[in-house]
Image (cartoon, rainbow, N blue to C red):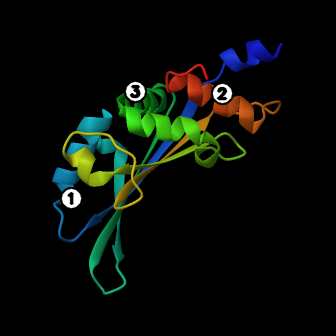
Amino acid sequence: MQKEKLTSFEIAVAEISFLVHATEEKDRVINLISSVLIVDKDEFESENLLGHWGNQIEMTKGRLKGKLARDVANTILRSLDTYDRKKMLCSLDDYVDDKGTLHLRLDKQKICEGKIELSDIDSIKIKFKPKLFFSRFKQDYILEYRRLLGSND
């Protein structure tokens, strides 16, 4: 019975957010991120903010549902290099919360170079929210993310 429930796992929502600083060209950054993650740039909305020193910052967010969310998850998880993949596989418990949401931070500068890498500095924050099942435990979600990362460990 448990096996049947796990096969119906799917990403339902992807929430993407990142900052665009005054020193960056907003349109260029959004176009590059859209291109690498294979997301239509019109999916992003920006809000003007002021930084600590009064500098202009734009918070840019996108919310994808269904197939678009699953496609972005697959693009990212399959594009990670061996080091990032192993890092995630060894510590998936740190990336997944109790509701099964996978929290990632990608290096914004590397994405602008066409590469997908994990990073905590100047990052693109991404949350992948799975279709929820009340009978699931965190470990069930971790097993599914392992499968998406291409590991049967």
The residue that appears at 32% across and 36% down in the rendered structure is: 37
Q: In this view, does 59 lie above or below 102?
A: below
Asked if residue 131 can be seen in this view, the reply is no
Q: Which quadrant of the view contains residue 138?
A: top right
Q: Nearer the viewer, residue 41 or 96?
A: 96
The residue that appears at 58% across and 30% down in the rendered structure is: 145
Rendering coords of residue 55 (x, y %): 27, 81
> Mark 2 vs mark 1: which is more N-terminal?
1
The residue that appears at 61% across and 23% down in the rendered structure is: 153
Tell me if 21 is positioned left or right of 5 in this view: left
Q: Residue 75 carries which label?
A: none
Q: Give the secondary structure at mark 1.
A: helix
Tell me if 19 is positioned left or right of 24 in this view: right
Q: Nearer the viewer, residue 138 or 41?
A: 138
Q: Which mark is residue 143?
A: 2
Q: Give the secondary structure at mark 3.
A: helix
Rendering coords of residue 141 (x, y %): 67, 32
Rendering coords of residue 43 (x, y %): 36, 43
The residue that appears at 40% across and 38% down in the rendered structure is: 83
Tell me if 116 is positioned left or right of 69 in this view: left
Going by the numbered disc 2, the residue's amino acid type is Leu
Task: Read off the residue under disc 3.
Answer: 78
Asked if residue 142 can be seen in this view, the reply is yes
Task: Report, in whole angstroms, how far the alpha carbon at label 2 lies from the one at label 3.
Answer: 16 Å
Going by the numbered disc 1, the residue's amino acid type is Lys
> Mark 2 vs mark 3: which is more N-terminal?
3
Task: Report, in whole angstroms, how far the alpha carbon at label 2 lies from the one at label 1.
Answer: 37 Å
Task: Read off the residue under disc 1.
Answer: 26
Q: Which quadrant of the view contains residue 2?
A: top right
